[in-house]
Image (cartoon, rainbow, N blue to C red):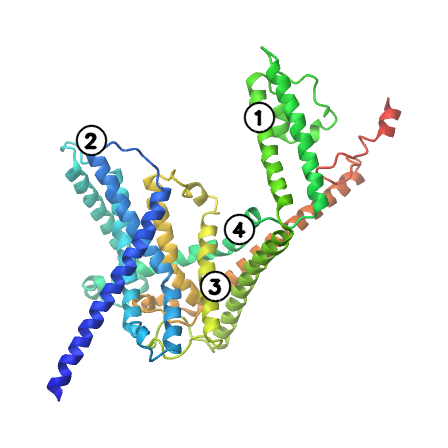
Amino acid sequence: MYDVDEPDEREELFYNNVREKIIFLLLFVLLLTLSYIIVNKYRKRDNIVVSIRDEDDYTVYKYSLLLCTISLAVSVGAALLLPISIASNEVLSLYPSSYYVQWLNHSLIHGLWSLVFLFSNLSLFIFLPFAYLFNESEGFPGHRKGLKARVYETCTVLLLLAIFVLVLTYLLYTIFYAEQSIFYMLFNLWNNYLPFLYSCISFIGVLMLLLCTPVGFATLFTILSRFMIKPQLQKTTDEEISVLRLEVDCLTRRLDQVSQNNGSSYMSPQPMLAKKEQKMSLPERELWSLTNGKLKNGLADKLLNFQERLDVLEKQRKTSVFRKLFFFPTFMLLLLALTVITVLLVVQNLLLILIGIRALPLNTRQFTLGVSSLSKLGPFGAGLEIVIILYMLVASTVGLYSLPVVSRYRPRIKQTPLTHIVGNCTLLLILSSALPLLCRILGVTDFDLLADYGRIEWLGNFAIVALYNVVFASAATLCLINKFTLAVRKELLSRLKSFWQWVIGRDCSIPRDNSIFSIDNSPMINKKTS
């Protein structure tokens, strides 16, 4: 009987391994295709001519772009680790004996986490540095120029950089683990140095997410209001359209007058804004003082700006009432609800950790996939967790490119050079690799971190986890309050300033920025003055 069962177990193990490798290959090909489409859409068309002289440059460019594509695919896979794992756990808990989901098991998900962890290290420490150095290399001085010389230079510089990073990691490791012997640290490079180095990088990524995610929460509202049509009163829209049409007609006549004057071009007659000259903005004041071709170009740009605003208002007026009154409030309330739910989950997680009901996110127990649902609300709660994780991913990416320094390197369609592509892939890889850690620290999900993600030891530090929850909840709340009260505070400060100027006798005008009615323009005062 033993001889009959033994081949069946080996055969089943063989089929399971083959099936897992095929699934991993299909996922990698899918992510690689998606990443190639994204990189090809944003990369700058350098128009490299393939010839004998430029063949090396084209080869270097091609392989560097391939390494960036692989790294971007790994970053997308790292960002989707938690959603895929949570969905797999719910499917297995709902249909434990179904024939169609037998391939979805704990071994498959655990292997996926291990592969993503491995390729994240390879992309972060080998692929992306090699792509950047390979693109910037020219070969050692005094040697024959060519592809081999550039490969030798890249490998040499990369080796020196790796030695520097390992020495720096060794110093940090001796600071945190001073009780271990030197021989133990030297002969356990793979088991100690590399996980410790990745934990340092992941800690930097978590700190970046702490800065980017709350900023992204507030920035998403601005982006939504920019692309969605706001509900406006028809009367207000008609008034704005009338004012813009008058501005367009006035600028058109001025532009025609400037175009008709040969030789010197200037404003004749002068605009009737002499008494308002001190209240005009600097660009507008400079526009009326220009002459010749600069005046014509300035008027044309201003006319184009007014025409674009007029087109937007015309589009808003022609839009259906249902779209104006339903889509914008719905999406705005959806973003607000997701943000509020995220903050409430963070506050709840902090309270449970302080009380001692919830353990720290360090993986200390054996987890088996599909035993039970990890959410108290069942499949609905798991779906909500997936939506919140994806929302945090989008918010962190938007917040990253809203920062002052990073915004200058934001990828643009068909205008992004290769060096910027390498930098953006590095930032996205760091953020996406730290996203599972962020979700476990904030308590968004109870799904344990698998593979080497659960070996990151600073996740078991109570002070770091508690402080991170406090800072994240406070930052997200302040960003929301600042976003929704900014206009009110600006109007309040403007009115207080106008009242103070009226008290000290400097200004008696009504505090409206765009108002043309004031005491200075009153006909009775002008008559008495004359």
Tell me if 64 is positioned left or right of 415 in this view. Answer: left
Tell me where residue 232 appears, x and y as whole percent: 67, 48
Give the secondary structure at mark 4.
Answer: helix
- Give the residue number, with chain letter if any, for mark 3: 388
- Give the residue number, with chain letter if any, for mark 1: 300
Q: How many marks?
A: 4
Q: Residue furthest top?
A: 263
Q: Amino acid at mark 3?
A: Ile
Give the secondary structure at mark 1.
Answer: helix
- Give the residue number, with chain letter if any, for mark 2: 51
Mark 4 or mark 3: name the one nearer the start of the chain.
Answer: 4
Crowd around label 4: few <14 · some 14–19 · many ≥20 (10 Å):
some
Q: Amino acid at mark 4?
A: Thr
Mark 2 or mark 3: name the one nearer the start of the chain.
Answer: 2
- Give the residue number, with chain letter if any, for mark 4: 219
Name the foreground residue: 66 vs 26.
26
The residue at the point 72 percent across, 25 percent down is 273
Q: Amino acid at mark 1?
A: Ala
